[in-house]
Image (cartoon, rainbow, N blue to C red):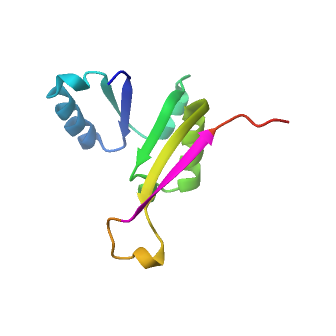
Amino acid sequence: MGANTLGVDAAESNIGIATAHALADPGLSSLTYKHGAVENLLEEPKQYDVVCSMEVLEHVDSPKQFISTLCQLVKVWNVYFVSGPCFDPSSLGDTSSFRLFLGHHWPTHS
């Protein structure tokens, strides 16, 4: 893939499943996984080139805080992607509807 990729999940069983899948495919050797909340990554002095959160936002207690955490994890001048279900009333019952949000971490000028 040409990149080192870290997967994070709050459910330990999901980490086990993902690890088993990665071990079965030699092309995925650059994948690593961590069990825990994404907020725990703030304890490490590391930022990422790209941060993706797919179908997670609707499961967190505080979406605003979660997005704030993603912003802190992505390097300046880079982007984060977040997808979640579309809560537009016209899409109720349509499980294929989702929204993709694109955010950025660009410095502000004073």
Residue 22 appears in which quarter of the rendering? top left
Q: Name the residue at 51% across, 39% down.
A: 39
x and y percentages locating residue 35 in the rendered image: 35, 35
Q: Would you say the magenta stretch is mainly helix, strand or loop?
A: strand
Residue at 36% x, 43% y is 10
Q: Residue at x 32, y 26 (%)?
A: 32
The residue sitting at the front extreme is 2
**Residue shown at 58% from the left, 53% from the top:** 64
Location of the C terminus (image quadrant)? top right
Question: Is 32 placed above or below 97 here?
Answer: above
Residue 101 shown in magenta: yes
Span colored in magenta: 97-104
Q: Is residue 87 magenta?
A: no
Residue 29, position in %: x, y? 25, 21
Q: Left or right: 92 with respect to 23?
A: right
Report the residue that reaches farthest toward the left. Answer: 24
Examine the rendered structure and indicate whether residue 42 appears above or below residue 3.
Answer: below
Q: Please give the count of numbered marks on the rendered protein.
A: 0
Using the image as rendered, state which of residue 30 and residue 40 is in the foreground: 30
From the top left corner, tell me how far across and down residue 97 is, in percent. Answer: 38, 65
Residue 52 x, y percent position in the rendering: 44, 41
The quadrant holding residue 85 is bottom left
Residue 11 or 85: which is nearer the viewer? 85
Quadrant showing the N terminus: top left
Q: Nearer the viewer, residue 16 or 23?
A: 23
